[in-house]
Amino acid sequence: LNTQIEEFGRKHRISQRIIYNIQAYVEEMCVQILLPQIDSPFEMLITIEYSEDKDDADVVLRYSGTAFDPTKTDNELSLLLAKKATDSIAYSFDHVQELGNRVDAKIR
């Protein structure tokens, strides 16, 4: 996944700082916080959108399963590192959607 993020960043001429912050955020949020908490099997969709005008990226993580707010995790170190890579993180849950858990992050 880190390689795909790197290739996406280089293809769209995103600064190395933002590429690194996206990678760090995804690593901490997905691997360290979400994967240990989500019931198997599960589905996850990661969407990254970059704005050249604003020089920032929006990262959206959507995943199946019961409601789990990763901003309320006991893994304080990983959450601190994820927050350090972002300007903001927001969680929401929609019980109607198949991928009802949603985490939005703004990265600069």
Image (tube, grey):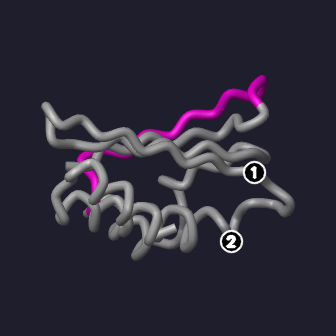
Disc 1 and disc 2 in contact, CB within 8 angstroms: no
- Part of the protein shown in magenta: 85-97
Q: Nearer the viewer, mark 1 or mark 2?
A: 1
What's the residue at 38%, 44% (across, down)? 105
Specify whether 3 is left or right of 31. Answer: left
- Name the image quarter holding residue 59: top left
Q: Residue at x 44, y 71 (%)?
A: 3
Does the stretch in magenta take in 10?
no
Query: Which three-letter amino acid code belongs to the residue tagged 2?
Result: Pro
- Determine which residue is flagged by label 2: 36
Q: Which residue is mark 1?
A: 43
The extreme top residue here reads 96
How far across and how far down the image is residue 83, in percent? 32, 59
Q: Please tell me whether residue 10 is drawn above or below residue 105 in the rendered image.
A: below
Q: Which of the two residues, 83 or 15, is positioned nearer the viewer here?
A: 15
**In this rendering, position of residue 70 left or right of residue 23:** right
